[in-house]
Image: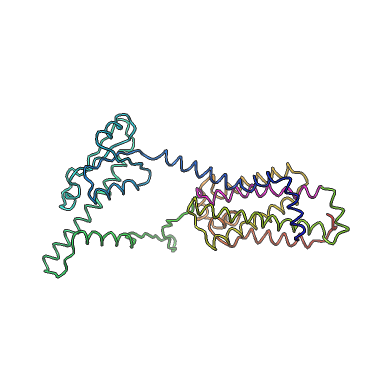
Amino acid sequence: MINTFITRLIQMKHQWLRLVLWLLLPLFLTWIVMSMIDQLQSESEVPVGIVLEEKTPLALELYEKIEQAPLIRTSLLSESTAQNKLLKHDLDSVFIIHEGYEQNIETDDRQELITGLKSNLSFAYIPTSEVIMSFVQEHAVRAKAAIAVEDLIKDYNSSLSPTMADIIKKSKDVQDNQDFLTTSFTLNGESHAGDADDTLFVKPWNIWALSTLLTTLFMFDWVIKEKRTALQPRFTLMRMSFKQYLLHNLAFYTVLLFIFDLLTAVFFKIFFQEQLSLTTVGVLLSYRLLLTISAFLLAICFKKNHLFYTIAFTLFLICAIISGAVFPMTPIWKTYNWLTWFNPVYAFIHDEFFSVWLLIVIVILILWSLRKGRSHA
């Protein structure tokens, strides 16, 4: 096998540019798609101007919450600058957090806490104002609860003497550490909990899974080329059969591609903050074996490259559709669980080691390797 690896490396010296292109293309396509998604999301954010007339802890906390809200792009501006940008339609709306915000919240005075400004082209003023008001309501409710607790302590002459800040901090800790709302429902005697972690296609690994599927299929056109060469008759005089030669090359490509898969995992951890663990490596290895063996077995069945490319691209489109890349498939999978068995990408997307497709292709590969035939065919 070592000699086969060395021979393959020598052959690749003359095709290194094409090889590097196929090896890096999945990573490059994933980076492009994720960059386009980030750009689209950035452009879809609503530009909102925030004016802080005071910079107390509570006012600054409110600004941070608004800044972290999804689909809102905030700018901290002076009142004159914000109004000028609003008139020029550079901002969708402006919200002024008035001086005395923290004091009014602590005294349960909710009059004129925030003023909202909009123009005749402000299309997202109402939903934005509702989001901001929900944050203000959260502050007001905490402060009111703290006042109630203080009153109870006074009424019962308790030895406890927590400050309002301590009570508010405790309420935040409880909110962060506990789930206040858990829903479930029963249908036909079966209990179902809300699934808050539905798999979305717009993830780096999902994009990479489909792009590497296509590139792996195209890379294995070497099987067709080797079958057409005039070297096959020479294997009759060698200890190694042509079938063994193909299997050794399959092992070589599997190792080579898996090394690049590991480099991809490191890249995703650095740039996309994806998890990198032994589970990730195991799922990657399972998926890589599935792709290389499947591509090898498919290429064995063809004698002409163009027909192989056509079938490979067709299989890629089918996998892209049933994996949820074009149409959302999660509701269908939940209704008809057996459909997931027809999706070769499903196990990888859901971080599962076992794939029925991997078991099938391994069995087919073993049967093919044990099948009797001429040593050079």
Judge left or right: residue 89 versus residue 212.
left
Q: Is residue 54 above or below residue 88?
A: below
Q: According to the image, what is the colour scheme of the structure?
A: rainbow
Magenta segment's dominant SS is helix
Depth check: 61 or 306 in front? 61
| Residue 91 location, quadrant | top left
Q: Residue at x 73, y 43 (%)?
A: 307
**Residue 31 location (% of width, % of height):** 53, 45
Q: Is residue 204 magenta?
A: yes
Judge left or right: residue 319 versus residue 193.
right
Depth check: 178 or 251 in front? 251
Quarter of the figure that contains the C terminus: bottom right
Q: Residue at x 62, y 50 (%)?
A: 213
Q: Residue at x 16, y 58 (%)?
A: 147
Quarter of the figure that contains the N terminus: bottom right
**Residue 281 location (% of width, % of height):** 57, 60
Depth check: 292 or 75 in front? 75
Q: Is residue 335 above or below residue 41?
A: below
Q: Is residue 28 magenta?
A: no
| Residue 85 location, quadrant | top left
Q: Hey, which residue is sitting farthest bottom in the picture?
A: 159
Depth check: 276 or 181 in front? 276
| Residue 367 location, quadrant | bottom right
Judge left or right: residue 198 versus residue 285.
left
Q: Which residues are magenta?
A: 201-228
Q: How many numbered marks are there? A: 0
**Residue 209 location (% of width, % of height):** 58, 51
**Residue 214 location (% of width, % of height):** 63, 47
